[in-house]
Amino acid sequence: MARRIRAFFFVGLLSFVAACTNDDDDAGGHDHSNMPVDAAAVMGQPDRPIAGPQGGVGQFVVECPFSHALSDDPIVYPGDEDASHLHTFFGNVAADADSQLQDLLEQPTTCEQQLDTASYWAPALLDEGELITPEKSVAYYRAGLGLDPTTVVAFPAGLMMIAGDHMATTPQPVSVVAWSCGAGGLREELPPVCPPTRGLRLDVTFPDCWDGKNIDVAGHRKHMYYSSDGKCPSSHPVPVPQLIFAVTYPVTGDASQLQLASGSLLTGHADFINAWDQEKLQQEVELCIHRNVVCGVTSGRSSG
Amino acid sequence: MKRSIRKFCGVIILAGVIASCGGSENSPATEAPGTDAPATDAPATDAPATEGVLNVPADFPTIQGAVDAAVEGDLILIAPGTYTEAVQVTTNNIIIRGLDRNTVILDGNFELDNGIRVVGANGVALENMTAMNYTKNGFFWTGVTGYRGDYLTAWRNGDYGVYVFDSVGGVIDNSYGGGSPDAGVYIGECFPCDSLIRNFVAEHNGLGYSGTNAGGNLVITGSIFRNNRAGIVPNSGSYELCYPQRKTTIIGNWVYSNNQADSPAIDVAILAMGNGILSAGGVQNIIERNRVWDHNKTGIGLVPFLEDDPNDEMPEKSAWDMTCAESKKLTPVQPGGGILWDSQDNTVRNNVLEDNRRADIAVGSAGTDLWTLGNCFEGNTYTTSAPTNLEALSPCGTPLTADGDWVTGDLQVITWLVDAETAPPSVDWKIATLPDMPVFDSMPDAATAPGVAASATPPVVDLDAITVPDKIS
């Protein structure tokens, strides 16, 4: 874990210039015709970005190193290999286009929490078309802003979620998709210039209200919604943990010439399949979110 | 009587669903060593069935099973053996004790997260056992009032050895933390902490002690910090709450040879490498009567902590006495850029230092005039300082001035950022070479001493009676 930080140090200090020499503009080539264009219209959005010091709000945190990269999307193109833009996967080591819940539950994970066998993925970050291997991801699970934490229930087994808009051509709300440097409080629409000690990070905030019925729907969005004003809407009455998924890259300095595999740097998004050990997930929700206790280290300290 | 009935129920439940019991916690295999499941007939054990005592594995095959059955005031006694469990504690005022510190071993097998995690349960005492090979922490309290760790050994764990976060009122006594990339022992995010670390040994960690934003009746004494990347390193930072770090008393400790190149280390530990006692943006600390020797950088250094991307602005000095609970209610203000937490108003007095190669005692900044920081140095036994005439420039009890030579011998702390680039990289905590695990003294009378829940008032230490400890090797 600390080894990766070292690597990040060196890359950051010695060679970030290499990441700034590209003049490519848009990778293009995505073919997600069945996806909504205006995610906010379908799912709402948080009242404000969630960022800030560890310790204020009960939560549990899972760090999951990079696992693998595939042009698969188990939610959008199930069973259809190489149908998607390139994704970087975290957590479950076996996630691919064919993944079913039961398969995932039986597979190992890169997460330090070994019972988190969920799969998390995000579009690959590219430099002149070359994959920039992410260092790790951090998944923060907490109650949505202003929600009574004791009302939050664990995600149902097998829940599938997407957050962010892979077809965005204008900036997305930073409360949903944002770039930052390390675990600091900065939330930007496009990558900021990150200092040597804190690598570039993509922060994606998932919806925290569930319709109580479907683990997935056509279009993969309408079963979930973002809480607002401390409440879930009556259409999506079940508060679930707000998952904030952050991917850290070995990138410092000017990142403006990089691309995401889904398109420009505006197209940030992330996907999640709940394949946690369900009992452990429920336990963490009760111990940490219900009791409003911080149950782990966040990486403001760069411990991994 | 009430006790026997309840215990009887526990045994029945265990006997009935023993398989699912194993799966009900986060350890993949929780076979207790050398025991089978207890017989169904009642609270039969080889130990006398004492009121309020739950025996593992005799009464309960797993520690978690006993913890789940325990009520406030219960004492859980663990027999020697290796327990592959990650235990969660949510019941107030229970005591979990090993019968032998060296042979009651909780082993995370490099898979489980925390040896014992106490979540929001007040007054829980952990005593006389070893936790090793956990991906996070050996022993972990969070969100509690009142805690006690006594005769604990934390060995080769992936974050911290003994980790106390957002908790107040406690003591970590007679314990050991070795082989973690962060700190051997940590108390953070509390003010006032009302806590004591005493008779601790931290070695071969990234940091011996770390305490982000901790202080207020927080005393570290009689402890050994050796062969870590850096020794005692309290720091400020808005990445956690209750900043700044302040009012910690570090007194009567042995701090030596913290230059360890082959230990696991988080990046902060690599940056701090080669320092004995290092305040990184801490304020109003008292560092007194410690013996500090053999460091590549400073024996006792007061330096800034640079936070590139802070979550809040620095509190005004007038807010430094605000309690942690109060300050949590404030809304953070996102600053425009990085902030520099200077070490201010610290007192460094009557320490004995030798062979700290950059300087025995030092204060440094990244641009701030040193005299404005108000740190004082007095009565130390030392050879070198940065700046060169530090004690003459910084007497205690009188306001400092710009007069005198604050420039010659300046610490040049900013160059440490460059040093960190070429410092020996972290070694994976799972494979880092550690010395043989010492055989530690166990808690006296572990089998018979009554269980006492943790008080929220730490033992009172007579600070005046503490002298500089004799040199050891």
Image (cartoon, rainbow, N blue to C red):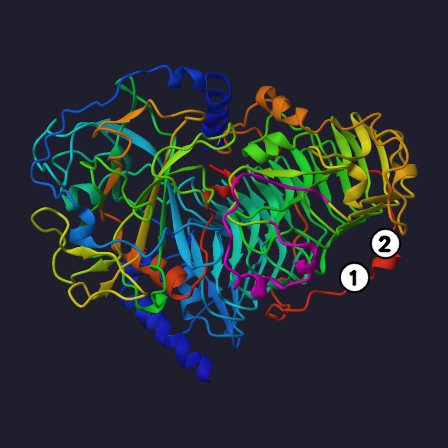
Residue at the spot of label 1? B461
Query: In the image, is B129 to the left or to the right of B316?
Result: left
Residue A170, compared with residue A225, is above or below; it is: above
Q: Secondary structure at mark 1?
A: loop
State whether residue A68 appears in this view. yes
Marks 1 and 2: in contact by CB < 8 Å? yes
Q: What residue do we see at 67% from left, 38% from top?
A: B304
State the predominant SS element of the stretch in magenta: loop
Relative depth, front residue between A183 and B259: A183
Q: Which mark is residue A8?
A: none
Query: In the image, is B232 to the left or to the right of A228?
Result: right
Chain assignment, label 2: B
**Distance between mark 2 and mark 1 Cα atoms:** 9 Å
Q: What residue do we see at 87% from left, 29% from top?
A: B388
> Magenta stretch: residue B372 in it?
no
Q: Earlier in the sequence, mark 2 or mark 1?
A: 1
Q: Three-letter amino acid code at disc 1?
A: Val
x, y percentage for residue B37? Answer: 35, 61
Please state the extent of the stretch shown in magenta in the rendering.
Answer: B314-343
Residue at the spot of label 2? B466
Residue B343, compared with residue B141, is above or below; it is: above
Chain assignment, label 1: B
Q: What residue do we see at 51% from left, 33% from top?
A: B429
Q: Secondary structure at mark 2?
A: loop
x, y percentage for residue A77? Answer: 10, 36
